[in-house]
């Protein structure tokens, strides 16, 4: 067995009154222990749906899930709900964006952390309660033995996020999915939480999937980046490759459109024209072609044929889904995009 | 404090205290000191950025300027008129000059009104009939903000987030105001759309000579929009300077920490930058720390910081409120 998590050809579709929403379309990737994969995309690109599928949280809903998801040798999609439940919380767990919504307002923080521990371990309530205090201490909450009896509303935003991380890590999971874990937080607190995640990963060797729209956050913490657009993986590579020598025109657009703290602030930002497509009517061919500035370099193929995900050069880790030839992309990047980065 | 030339808006000692919870049934009411003694001026045609973390009072300041809230103390002077305690009917003519763009493009548009109704309402309220009729004028404005004028009869739900924000901007622009307060206008939008809206607002500022107060938590966004930047912390302004000075040489420890905490999408920049990690959270504005409000998280804090609130003083090109500026 190689990677701890292996996703092969994952597709998730939702039948709706208006038609089928193809939220995720034949996605494949893997994450090793101790590594962090950043899944980046805009709203509606399918990044959260992917994470829910990995945790098997679409079972019992109308979602049509196909493909294979291997977590530590267990296939999730074909497993029953009770089998997945044994893995959830123990082998893999998740932290959500909005900690106030994810924590139960009627129970103390300590109770909620202990509950997760009790489900997966045959221990007394007392041991579980002690574990809750230990975890709160581990994520840096001051006076954990007192705060363990507080309710979520008595915690600040950053502390709630820490409590949720404590809950997710209480059973030492090998895979942690963090869905926009810092989006609701202020920058100074965001920096604290990212550092905490990094430290905990070093200590426990957890594999982390970080879902975010913020390329800055990914640069801070991830090893690999998977860039999604309209449910498809359009670029994959190491953080350095994707952020420094991006290959897909969408990646170029994203990187040149974000305001930065360096460079000339008087220059207009290079915005991507148009808006992300509706997943009910994804454009034919390359889903990005209606917004792409470089369509004329290829011609009809962009609008008609879905490009394959191919390595940038022979045997490279870095792959991209674009019809332009490697030479053409290199030329455009060197002359037009690179100077703006 | 130094004054800017020809200020269109001047804020002196602006304070807003909200009543909080009670301490027991007969207890005293807590007071949330959302904004406490804020001074600044905005010159005609400039864009002032107001940055800070949640709870620092930046949105409350924006609402006080537009008089959606009444200040507890202090004055708001708009074009030489003290509007701090104007009644709604007194405010009505002022509001044609003073408009607001809101953060959430989903909540700030009435779902039961068409785009045409939304953008033409300012004309109806103020009983203004522009040349060529309201409809023609509204369609012109829709075109200016990059919307299709034929969408006049559509409802907000038919538009994407970025387009809705354009509708909000069109509504604010309808009466050709002089000052627009934009409260987090891009933070609810996707990254690729943010740049479109920033560019649009920049173009509008140039074309119509608008003055902006731009409220945001994102320092990189503010850097691309504002010419002058004020940093707020817990109801106070801790530093004001022109953009280049503030970003190149932050004087207040908080500004420095805030800048160093911004994650950058460049793997090489990460190791190269000096990192300041603030510990803890922003204190509760019901019971802010004595003296300098930042002292509980500041690595430079000394005795004087706990006893004396630092005044906003001019140091070089910057105004900074700190006993030990950089």
Image: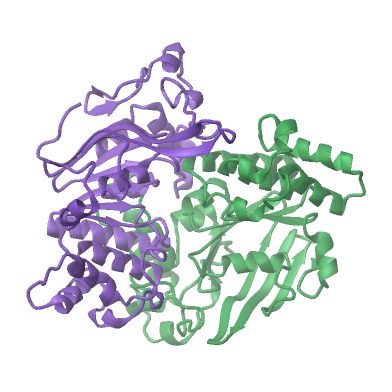
Name the residue: 45% across, 21% down: B290
Image x and y of residue B243, in percent: 26, 39
Image x and y of residue A40, in percent: 53, 61
Query: Can residue A253 be seen in the rendering of this structure?
Result: no
Residue that sits furthest to the top in the current view: B303
Quarter of the figure with residue B171: bottom left
Q: How many marks?
A: 0
Q: Colour of chain B?
A: purple
- Residue B268 vs A140, above or below: the answer is below
Closer to the camera in the image, B5 or A282: B5
Quarter of the figure with residue B58: top left
Query: Can residue B206 be seen in the rendering of this structure?
Result: yes
Quarter of the figure with residue A128: top right
Judged left or right of residue A56, residue A321 is left
Q: Colour of chain A?
A: green
Image x and y of residue A223, in percent: 59, 51
Q: Name the colouring of the figure.
A: by chain
Closer to the camera in the image, A166 or A322: A166
Judged left or right of residue A308, residue B199 is left
């Amino acid at each position: 067995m190689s990677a701890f998590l292996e996703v092969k050809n994952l597709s998730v579709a939702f039948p709706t009154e208006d038609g089928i929403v193809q939220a995720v379309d034949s996605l494949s990737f893997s994450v090793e222990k101790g590594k962090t994969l950043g899944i980046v995309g805009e709203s509606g690109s399918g990044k959260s749906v992917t994470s829910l599928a990995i945790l098997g949280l679409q079972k019992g809903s109308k979602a049509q899930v196909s493909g294979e998801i291997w977590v530590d040798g267990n296939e999730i999609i074909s497993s029953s709900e009770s089998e997945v439940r044994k893995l959830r919380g123990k082998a893999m767990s998740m932290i959500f964006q909005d900690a106030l919504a994810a924590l139960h307002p009627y129970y103390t923080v300590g109770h909620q952390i202990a509950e997760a521990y009790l489900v997966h371990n045959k221990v007394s309530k007392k041991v579980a309660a002690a574990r809750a205090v230990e975890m709160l201490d581990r994520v840096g909450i001051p006076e954990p033995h007192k705060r363990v009896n507080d309710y979520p509303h008595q915690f600040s935003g950053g502390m709630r996020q820490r409590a949720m991380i404590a809950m997710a890590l209480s059973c030492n999971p090998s895979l942690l999915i963090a869905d926009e874990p810092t989006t609701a937080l202020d920058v100074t607190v965001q920096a604290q939480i990212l550092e905490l995640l990094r430290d905990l990963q070093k200590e426990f060797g957890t594999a982390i999937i970080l879902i975010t729209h913020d390329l800055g956050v990914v640069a801070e913490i991830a090893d690999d980046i998977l860039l999604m657009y309209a449910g498809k993986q359009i670029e994959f590579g190491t953080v350095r490759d994707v952020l420094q020598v991006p290959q897909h025109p969408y990646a170029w657009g994203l990187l040149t459109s974000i305001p930065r703290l360096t460079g000339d602030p008087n220059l207009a930002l290079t915005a991507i024209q148009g808006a992300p497509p509706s997943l009910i009517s994804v454009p034919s061919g390359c889903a990005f072609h209606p917004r792409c500035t470089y369509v004329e370099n290829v011609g009809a193929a962009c609008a008609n044929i879905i490009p394959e995900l191919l390595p940038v050069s022979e045997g490279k880790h870095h792959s991209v889904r674009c019809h332009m030839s490697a030479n053409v992309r290199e030329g455009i990047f060197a002359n037009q995009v690179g100077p703006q980065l | 404090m130094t004054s800017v030339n020809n200020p269109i808006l001047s804020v002196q000692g602006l304070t807003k205290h909200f009543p909080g919870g009670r301490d027991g049934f007969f207890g005293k009411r807590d007071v949330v000191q959302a904004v406490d003694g804020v001074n600044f001026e905005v010159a005609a045609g400039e864009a002032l950025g107001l940055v800070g973390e949640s709870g620092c009072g930046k949105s409350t300041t924006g609402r006080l300027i537009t008089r959606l809230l009444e200040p507890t103390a202090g004055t708001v002077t708009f074009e030489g008129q003290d509007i701090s305690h104007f009644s709604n009917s007194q405010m009505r003519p002022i509001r044609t000059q003073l408009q607001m763009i809101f953060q959430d493009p989903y909540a700030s548009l009435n779902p039961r009104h068409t785009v045409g109704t939304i953008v033409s309402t300012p004309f109806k309220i103020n009983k203004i009939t522009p040349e060529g009729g309201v409809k023609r004028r509204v369609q012109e404005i829709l075109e200016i903000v990059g919307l299709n004028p034929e969408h006049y009869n559509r409802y907000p739900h038919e538009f994407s987030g970025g387009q809705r924000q354009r509708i909000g901007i069109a509504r604010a622009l309808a009466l050709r105001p002089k000052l627009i307060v934009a409260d987090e206008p891009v933070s609810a939008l996707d990254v690729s759309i943010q740049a479109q809206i920033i560019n649009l607002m920049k173009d509008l500022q140039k074309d119509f000579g608008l003055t902006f107060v731009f409220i945001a938590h994102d320092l990189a966004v503010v850097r691309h929009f504002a010419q002058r930047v004020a940093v707020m912390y817990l109801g106070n302004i801790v530093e004001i300077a022109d953009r280049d000075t503030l970003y190149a040489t932050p004087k207040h420890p908080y500004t420095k920490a805030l800048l160093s905490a911004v994650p950058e999408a460049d793997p090489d920049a990460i190791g190269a930058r000096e990192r300041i990690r603030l510990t803890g959270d922003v204190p509760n504005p019901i019971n802010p720390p004595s003296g300098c409000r930042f002292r509980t998280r500041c690595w430079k804090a000394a005795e004087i910081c706990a006893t004396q609130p630092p005044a906003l003083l001019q140091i070089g090109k910057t105004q900074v409120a700190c006993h030990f500026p950089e």
